[in-house]
Amino acid sequence: MIRRDFSERDIHMAIDGELPADERAAYDAWLDANPEMKARSARFTADRTALRAAFAGVLDEAVPVRLRKVVFGETPVKAAVSRSRWWLAAAAAVLVVAGGLGGYLAGIDRVGQENPAEDQLAEQAIAAHVVFAAEKRHAVEVPASDKDHLQTWLSNRVGLKLVAPDLTANGFQLVGGRLLPAGESKAAMLLYEDDKGERISLFVTAQSSQNAKGTYASAQDGPQAVYWLDKGYGCAVVGSLPREQLAVVAKSAYGQLMAGLAS
Amino acid sequence: MHEKKAAILGEIPRLRRYARSLLRDRDAADDLVQDCLERALVRLDNWQTGESPRRWLFTIMHHLFIDQMRKVNRRGEATMLPLEAGEAVAQPAEQMESIASREIIDALQAISPDRRAALVMVAIEGFSYAEAANILGVPAGTLMSRIARGREELRGLLDDTARRRAIRIVEK
């Protein structure tokens, strides 16, 4: 009989059938010698039985027609994107936690490629805007007063030559910027504000391999994103302005960004 | 192609059970399964012949679930209702649940999503530690500690419920 010290950990292993067979006898002897552990084991075992019983009925239920239809191709696949949208509208969460969960989310991303790249970019940009544009005092990491440093820092981090566009002609002043995660890569966010306190943000990443452009809104009356993707970078301008006005600002920002990248 | 689809169809009851244990609400659980199936069908080519459809589908669904939980959590919704509140929200009695089943289902909903998934994966779905760790994308050690903490948390909640029930009886 194998002699070793057992612990609570072994109780779980034994219940889950993970205890090596040749340790079983020693384990049982240990349980007998430790009434408290034996009682604990009995409670956990009973809970396991109760859990299985509580959900056993599900296996006998008829498969709902809507699920059957998915498998046999009667539901357009596009529907997946729209039904999931309510999760995605809260995409802010991904941004906020991505820092600490980099590796984990990278794993999720591999499975989650069903969204076209442009949707992802727009969703990330909108999420960032929702979170940070609402912040009064902590909207940016580096303020506009330190613009040179802001541009150098973000350019180095994102890997693109970034020049913060001058949007004063459109009534917007630079507030500052911050660095954000974007999928497995990084994004720069530049925040602007007009004299009424209306804010728009620019979201730029170096992560893109396709060409696309368009507008995107994640919620009915939420902010909109105007975006461009080109080989080597993606850019989105996000705000709650009327669509035409946002398009004008975005065009101006895009032109200047392009000029900056090429300079 | 048809064989693959037939194999997927065969896994639906298991996927529904897993989803139901994760989310409780029947419609929400079936929504999760539907998203999982749609995602799976889009990437049918990624599924290697020989790979167990169960493992493949559970992995997809787990990612969807964790993704959703993180987002919902951040929106500040009560994903972890305290037990009293959980009881107050009258669940439609879609099937005859015994009191014991209802209590354990409520308690399961009250533990953290990560622990819930780990515990359900081995205790209900019967995956081995190695399989479960693989599906959840965590090291075996993490899985084991989630299972242990999940079980303890679940037991603690059930003890609390039992205590409250006892108090109520005494008060009568």
Image (cartoon, grey):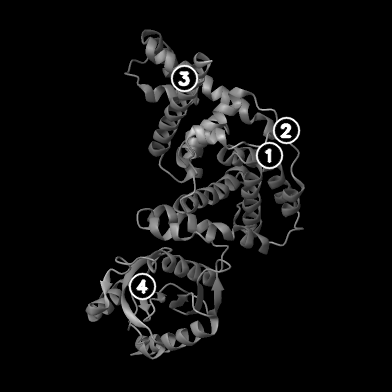
Q: Mark 3 or mark 1, which has the lower sequence index? A: 1
Number of the front mark, 3 or 2:
3
The answer to whether A180 is drawn above or below residue A228 in the figure is above
Q: Residue at x 35, y 76 (%)?
A: A190
Amino acid type, residue under disc 1 in the picture: Pro
Q: Which residue is mark 2?
A: A60
Q: Residue B139: x and y, percent? A: 40, 42
Pick the residue in front: B4 or A141. A141
Q: Which residue is mark 1?
A: B13
Q: Residues within 10 Å of mark 3 (few under 14, many from 20)?
A: few
Residue labelled with disc 3? B163
> Do callouts 2 and 1 mark residues in contact (Cβ within 8 Å)?
yes
The residue under label 4 is which amino acid type?
Ala
| Residue B147, quarter of the rendered image | top left
Name the residue tied to disc 4.
A188
Question: What is the chain letter for disc 3?
Answer: B
Residue A156 to residue B112: above or below: below
Q: Is residue A254 left or right of residue B109?
A: left
Q: Nearer the viewer, mark 3 or mark 4?
A: 3
Q: Residue furthest front?
A: B172
- Kind of residue at badge 2: Asp
Height in image: A64 above or below A170? above
- Mark 4 Cα shell of 10 Å, populated few (<14), some (14-19), many (≥20): many
Q: Are marks 3 and 4 in contact (CB under 8 Å)?
A: no
Q: Secondary structure at mark 1?
A: helix
Front residue of A112/A21: it is A112
Instruction: Name the element at disc 4.
Output: strand
Residue B13's quadrant in the figure?
top right
Q: Quadrant of residue A102?
A: bottom left
Q: Chain of mark 1?
A: B
